[in-house]
Image: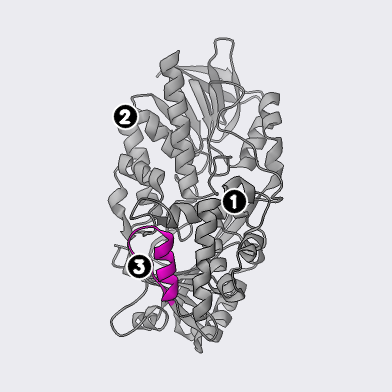
Amino acid sequence: MQKQMLMHELGEIVMKNEKIWDCIVVGAGVSGLACASSLAKKDKSVLVLEKSPLLGGRTSSVFNKRAATVLDNGQHILMGCYQETKRFLKRIGSSQDVQFLEQEPIVIKGLEKQGVFSMGRGASSWNLLWAMIKFKAIPFFDRFKVIQVGKALKQEKTDHLRSKTVKSWLESLDQSQALLERFWEPLCLATLNQNMEQACAAEFAVVLKKTFLSSDPQANSIGLCTKGLSEIFGLPAKKFIESKQGKILNRSAVISFYKTREKIYEVETDKEIFLSKKLVLALPPDQLFFLARESRIKKLLDSLRYITNLKASPIVTIYVKLKKQEDKALFFAINDKQSAKMVGFWNSPLHWLFDRPSFIEEKGDQYISMVRSAADAWLDKKPSQIFSEVCKTLDTLYGIEFKSMVEHYSIRKEAKATWVLKNLRYKTNVKERTYDPDLYLCGDWLDIELPSTIEAAARSGQRVAKHILRHSKNK
C-alpha cells in the first residue's frame, strides 16, 4: 500500500494512504460491522476505523483477571424476531453461538407473590392470552384484559401512538394496576430500557407486534449467548471482513473528514489519512455531532439538529459468584424438576437475574448476572454502594443474607447503553441517507421505526449497505 507523508495542522507527521477504498466505515459497533460485512460479502473493499481497542460496541466482552473469566460489557438477550441480527450472525459464522429457547419459563417475582410466564410456540395474541391465564402473579380476571392490547395492536397505527407514553396508552386499554406493575413494566424496561412513564408507546407497540403478532413461529423465543459477546459479534465480524480483503483498525480515532474535488472522501485519524469512494458514519449521536462539527460540515450539522432530543439511558450489570453453586436454586428453581434461566422483579431497583452458568459454554464461568435497566440512579454510585443495594433488595425479596453467600462480584456500567427520546412530541428525524449520495449514517438511534436495540443497529447497517450497493450499481 503506497503512503505519502503529510504535515498535520498541529505539526505532527501523518501518513496518507494512496489506496482508495470502496467504503470506509467509521465505528465498529453492531451497525458498523453489519454494514461492513454486508459490503464485504459483495466484494467491496471496506476499511473499518474504530477508536476503541474492542469491537462490537456494547456487544463486547473482556477477560476479568480477578474473576478469571470473560465477562460481557453487559447482559444482553436477543429475541427470535431479530431477523436482521440473525442474518448478520449467520453471515459472519457465529449464529450457532446463540441459543434460541422456545416456551422458556420466566419467573417474575414481587415481595409476596411470583408467577411463571411462558409463551407457547408461535406468535399470536391468543398465545399471549394463554400464557397470561397461567401467570398466577396477576389476579385471575385481570389476566383476560391483555385481549384489549392484542386488539389495539391489530387496529391502531403505530404513528398515532407517537406522542403517548406506554403507561398512558395501556391505561387507556383498561390494563389493571397489577398488570401494569407485574407484567408490562418489566417488559417495557427489558425492551426499551425506560420505565412506562417515559417510554414511547409507538416503540413499545412495534416490539409487541414483532414479538406476539408475527407470522414467524419463533418470534417470541429468547436468544441467550453461549459465549462472550466479542466471540459472537466483534471477532467473527473482523475475521469475515478481513477474509474478503477488508480491514479493521482498532485505536484509530477519526478526527475529521472532507470530500475532495475528485469526489473522494479523505478521512483523517490521529495517525493516518485514508481515502474512499463512500463514507459511512456508524457512530452514536454525541460522537457524530462532535465529528461533524470538527469537520465543519454545515449541511450535516443542520440535519442533526433533532438529536438534541435524544438522551442516553444506562444499564448496570452486576456479576456475582456464589460461594456455593447449589445456592442458585434459591433464585432459579421453579419446582423439583424445573428451573428458570431468567428471573424478573417488579417494584424493585433490581430488574433481572440470569443463571449464566446454565447457558454459557465456558465450564469455569460460575457467575450469575443481575441487571438494572434505565439505571440513572446507579450511574454515579460506587460499586460498593450498588452491591449494598443489591444485597438489601435480595434480602427483602428472598428472606436471606445475600452478602454472606457471595464470594466475588464485578460491576459493569453501560452509561450509553441505548438512546431514548427526551420529549415524545419530537422524533429524531435523522435518516440514513444524507445530503450527499456518498455519505451515510447508521446506528440504532436513527429514525428507522425500531427502538434502540441490537436489532435496530443490525437493520440500520444492512439497509445502508443495500443503499450503497444500489447506488454503485446505478452509477
Residue occupying image coordinates x 67% and y 59%: 198
Residue 47 appears left or right of 157: left
Reading the image, the residue beneath label 1 is 202
Q: Residue furthest top?
A: 262
Dot 1 crowding, Cα within 10 Å, few <14, some 14–19, many 20+: many
First to last magenta residue range: 116-134
The image quadrant of residue 10 is top right
Q: Do the residues under discs 1 and 3 have CB atoms within 8 angstroms?
A: no
Q: Do the residues under discs 1 and 2 have CB atoms within 8 angstroms?
A: no
Q: Residue 233, how many percent across, how many down?
A: 39, 47
Colour setup of the view: one colour
Amino acid type, label 1: Ala
Reading the image, the residue beneath label 2 is 244
Q: Element type at marker 3?
A: loop
Quadrant housing the N terminus: top left
Reading the image, the residue beneath label 3 is 104
Q: Residue 351, how many percent across, how many down?
A: 53, 70
Looking at the image, can residue 402 be seen?
A: yes
The alpha-carbon separation of the residues under discs 2 and 3 comes to 38 Å
N-terminal label among 2 and 3: 3
The image quadrant of residue 389 is bottom right
Does the stretch in magenta take in 118?
yes
Does the stretch in magenta take in 429?
no
Amino acid type, label 3: Glu
The alpha-carbon separation of the residues under discs 1 and 3 comes to 27 Å
Q: Nearer the viewer, mark 1 or mark 2?
A: 1
The image quadrant of residue 253 is top right
